[in-house]
Image (spheres, grey):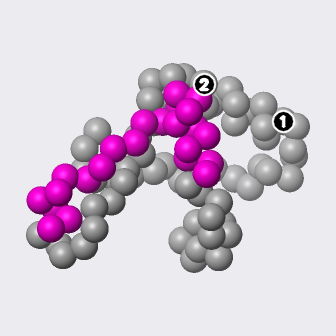
Amino acid sequence: MSTLSGLPNGTLFPLLERLRQAGWVERYWEQDAIAEAEGRPRRRFYKITSRGADLAPQALAEAMATDPGSQRGPLAAPGLAGGTA
């Protein structure tokens, strides 16, 4: 299990790929120079699209309405990955 997300290994990337195929997020690679300077492989970043930003609040509200057990309080606001918007 991933200690940061609380999700089992192999859960997050299939979910992100489904969101990408639906047009809710886009993915891109970190710049080569950044990864090389830190001596590691490039990272893949995901960014919510305007379509995802428009549709996500309604989808979340509907999901929470159909599953009362999912209402665990406010969601944390994500930070920017890779330092770009």
Q: Nearer the viewer, residue 42 or 78?
A: 42
Task: Give the total of numbered labels.
Answer: 2
In the rendered structure, the answer to whether residue 24 lies left or right of residue 37 reads right
The picture places residue 74, in percent across and down from the top left corner, at 63, 50
Residue 37, given in percent of the width and then of the height, sits at 11, 69
Q: Residue at x 79, y 40 (%)?
A: 64
Assess whether mark 1 and mark 2 are in contact (beta carbons under 8 angstroms).
Answer: no
The image shows residue 30 at horizontal and vertical percentages of: 26, 53
Q: Residue at x 45, y 24 (%)?
A: 50
Residue wearing tag 1? 65
* Magenta residues, start to end: 14-36
Q: Which residue is mark 2?
A: 55
Residue at x-position 18% and y-position 75%: 39
Q: Of discs 2 and 1, which sits in the foreground?
A: 2
* 8 part of magenta stretch: no
Amino acid marked by disc 2: Leu
Q: Secondary structure at mark 1?
A: helix
